[in-house]
């Protein structure tokens, strides 16, 4: 198969400033923040490893996007490279409430064959966020 990874996904937001602060508290870097603030580009992105999440701020109109894309429509699963306890501590330190977990989950690695647990939370737009911890 020639498709090997995800380059980026896109999600709309109702409040770009609030969303940016939230993801920075979680340790993510923001691409094109300065250019976006200056009005030089219409979007910014959240860097996730070798992938990114393009954020469509309020009022931004993309010609190519899902017809029903609205704030809160995104469901993202991140991979955490530490222990469950370290992930819980990071989320607590960022002021993020865990809404479910830790609990056993079937992730993508090894075709779903590796044991894993995950934690769920929500961002300010109510997007569902999951942190997968492979055991």
Image: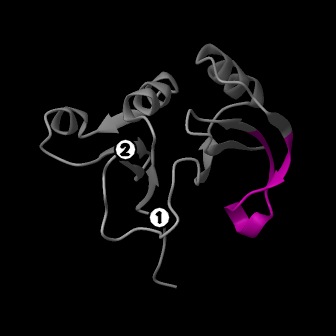
Specify whether 34 is left or right of 52. left
Secondary structure, mark 1, is loop
Give me the disc on residue 58: 2
Q: Is residue 23 above or below residue 12?
A: above
Q: Is residue 63 above or below residue 127?
A: below
Percent position (x, y) of residue 8? 41, 59
- The colour style of the image is one colour
Residue furthest to the right in view is 104
Q: Quadrant of the C terminus?
A: top right
Which residue occupies the foreground of this view, 113 or 92? Answer: 92
Q: Quadrant of residue 103?
A: top right
- Labels 1 and 2 touching (C-beta < 8 A): no
What residue is drawn where x is 37% and y is 44%? 58
Residue furthest to the top in view is 93
Which residue occupies the foreground of this view, 54 or 60? Answer: 60
Specify whether 28 is left or right of 63. right
Q: First in sequence: mark 1 or mark 2?
A: 1
Q: Is residue 114 magenta?
A: yes
Percent position (x, y) of residue 82? 66, 32
Q: Which residues are magenta?
A: 103-119
Give me the disc on residue 6: 1
Percent position (x, y) of residue 87? 68, 28
What residue is drawn where x is 77% and y is 64%? 112
10 Å crowding of disc 1: few (<14), some (14-19), many (20+): few
Residue furthest to the bottom in view is 1
Percent position (x, y) of residue 7? 40, 62
């Amino acid at each position: 198969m020639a498709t090997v990874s995800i380059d980026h996904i896109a999600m709309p937001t109702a409040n770009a400033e609030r969303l940016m602060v939230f993801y920075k508290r979680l340790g993510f870097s923001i691409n094109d923040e300065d250019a976006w603030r200056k009005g030089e580009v219409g979007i910014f992105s959240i860097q996730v490893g070798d992938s990114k999440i393009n954020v469509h701020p309020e009022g931004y109109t993309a010609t190519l996007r899902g017809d029903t894309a609205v704030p809160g429509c995104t469901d993202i699963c991140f991979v955490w490279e530490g222990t469950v306890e370290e992930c819980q501590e990071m989320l607590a330190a960022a002021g993020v409430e865990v809404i479910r977990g830790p609990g056993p989950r079937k992730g993508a690695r090894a075709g779903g064959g590796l044991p894993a647990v995950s934690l769920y939370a929500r961002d300010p737009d109510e997007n569902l966020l999951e942190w997968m911890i492979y055991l």
